Image: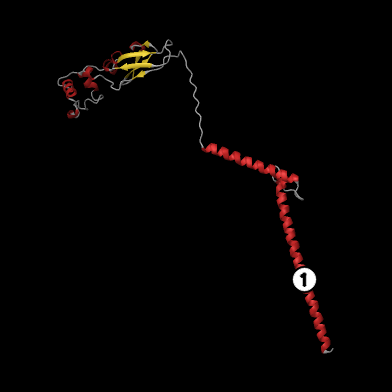
Amino acid sequence: MSAEDRGKKRLACGCVSGSSAEGLIMDLKEACGSGGSEDSSRRLSSWQAFARSSTLHGLRFVFPSGRPSVRRLLWALVLLSCIGLLALESAERLSYFLSYPHVTSVDAVASSSLVFPAITICNLNAYRFSRLTRNDLYHAGELLALLDVHLAIPQPHLAEPEVLAFLEEKSNFTAYKPTPFSMKEFIERVGHDLEEMMLYCRYQGQDCTSRDFQPVKSNRRRFVHATEGDQWSVHNVNIQLL
């Protein structure tokens, strides 16, 4: 083969190779274009599948397969309107909740006749100091915190002059012979009497006296309780004590 023939052959091979390269590039472009189209259609199909499987009413009609239509537009308007109303109502309820509203309802029932209520009067000064005797101080002086365990006046410099003079007189137990002591008798004798304490008592326009109360004794105190009676009607009680 001559040199001229070999040159023609190389030129022919080069032309064939160039044509093959251009064809390969076109095939790649077409492949890439077709792949992009398939991905786009795949994404659209996935969104349509989501719309069809969603429980939100009307969403599957907004994104149907095919071209846009008037029906699709109407469904979109309805869906957007519902979402807007939901947002508006939710905002209004939230604003109402944040205002912290409250309502207080009171029903007043009036009755013209009720049982006389239980009234207890207890004097904080359980015993009348002026009624104490030497025998009371001997047996209950320590209980009343007037004498110590040795029957002596504790801290006499803190006592009032009248109280100190009374205690010095009553607590002189030199050659004293005590008599039997009864706590019950002591409370009845030294405790306060409602008849002496109560100056005025009026209930529902009617006067009440100490006879409407009964004394109740405990271990160390004496109380008075109101006796019950159906003749009373409950409105107000006005009691003045001495």
- Is residue 43 at all visible to an observer of this figure? yes
Q: Estimate how packed mark 1 is, as few (under 14), some (14 to 19) or many (20 or more) residues with alpha carbons within 10 Å.
A: few
**What residue is drawn where x is 77% and y is 69%?**
26
| Residue 203, placed above or below residue 65 | above
Q: Which kind of residue does numbered mark 1 sit on?
A: Leu
Give the image location of residue 70, x and y in percent. Answer: 75, 45
User: What colour scheme has been applied to the protein in the rendered image?
Assistant: secondary structure
* Residue at x 16%, y 22% (from the top left corner): 165
* Residue at the disc numbered 1: 24
Image quadrant where residue 179 sits: top left
Let me know if residue 55 appears in the view.
Answer: no
Between residues 152 and 15, which one lies in front from this camera angle?
A: 15
Residues 136 and 202: in front is: 202
x, y (%) of residue 134? Answer: 20, 19
Residue at x 66%, y 44% (from the top left corner): 80
Q: The C terminus lies in which quarter of the figure?
A: top left
148 to 90, vertically: above or below: above
